[in-house]
Amino acid sequence: MGTPEQSTTGGPAVGWAVRVGGLAGACHPGPVVAVTALMAALAVTAGQSAARGVLTAAAVLTGQLSVGWCNDAFDARRDVAAGRRGKPVADGAIGVTEVWVAAYAALALCVPLSLACGLWAGAVHLAGVAAAWAYDLRLKATAWSWAPYAVGFAALPAFVALGLPGQPWPAWWVVTAGALLGIGAHLGDVLPDIRGDLATGVRGWPHRLGPDGARLLLPVPLVIASAVLVLGPAGPPGGRGTAALAVAVVVAVAGAVLGRRWERAAFVAAVAVAVVDVALLLLRGTGIA
Ligand SMILES: CC(C)=CCC/C(C)=C/CC/C(C)=C/COP(=O)(O)OP(=O)(O)O
């Protein structure tokens, strides 16, 4: 691990390849890639043109990058003090100033890219990105930590819908499902680290529920999202939708039961339900507006 001085200023001994790797690691690459790929796929199934789909994906990518970098830059001092491993700034791979510059550069790109998809689409996406920055800078350590996730994830499908020809308003059920998926993502993101977070005094919403409360609640928003995605669109739910909802309920119940003995089972079950939700979202893509 680097010293705090190296870690927060980017020591001269650190080569460019390590810095690039550090910058890539500091953006939270997993969620950045997953969210961008999902929104690009939704843009295709919703019926955006190829050019608009690329623009949508670029706006989402830059927004996610800005949020991920802002998160690590803001937390750097605490991560260094706690000797946290696996965080590029705390490990001394990249300086905190460089991560801040990257966060603001990505945000500066995100604004015109979002607005190029239309005024309403851009405004909605930027509201989601602003909510996520508010999470990074303030709300993460409060009882309201779930709210930016709900707003951010609700904004994403709304951004895709409003980017369609005629700028149609998104269907209520896709916005609701997005918000529920966001709340599930927050619980799922916190759960693996919750005991370590509690030891270092982090007090977001899942921490206030406690490890057992957060574990039990984790599948609830995800299963409700499945129900909303199956039952929300007009017309009969169809055999595939009903089967998907049944699978989500069974997996969630199994996760809750097994999770009492093996905590990891609850997490794996929640990921499986989230995969069902993503498949349903893409299947319902044509009707989101
Ligand atoms: C539209 C849009 C931008 C939606 C995103 C919504 C949102 C609030 C995302 C936050 C993502 C993030 C960087 C979490 C890290 O949390 P952490 O600090 O608890 O995790 P860590 O300590 O492992 O870095």
Image (spheres, rainbow, N blue to C red):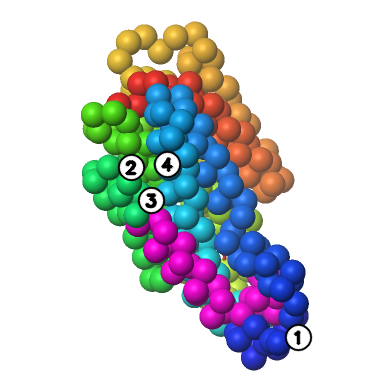
Seen at 51% across and 58% down, the residue is 65
Q: Is residue 173 left or right of residue 97?
A: left
Location of the N terminus (image quadrant)? bottom right
What x and y, as percent, mark residue 22?
67, 69
Please determine whether, in this image, residue 143 is positioned above or below residue 248: below
Marked residue nearer the N-terminal end (4 or 3):
4
Tell me which segment is drawn in magenta. 85-111
Q: Can residue 134 be seen in this view?
A: yes
Residue 220 within the segment the image draws in magenta: no
Query: Which residue type does callout 3 highlight?
Result: Leu
Pointer 3 residue:
113
User: Relative to residue 250, is residue 42 drawn left or right?
Assistant: left
Q: Residue at x 46, y 62 (%)?
A: 106
Q: What element carries label 4?
A: helix
Q: Real-space Cα distance between discs 2 and 4?
A: 7 Å
Label number found at residue 117: 2
Tell me the residue that label 4 is attached to.
56
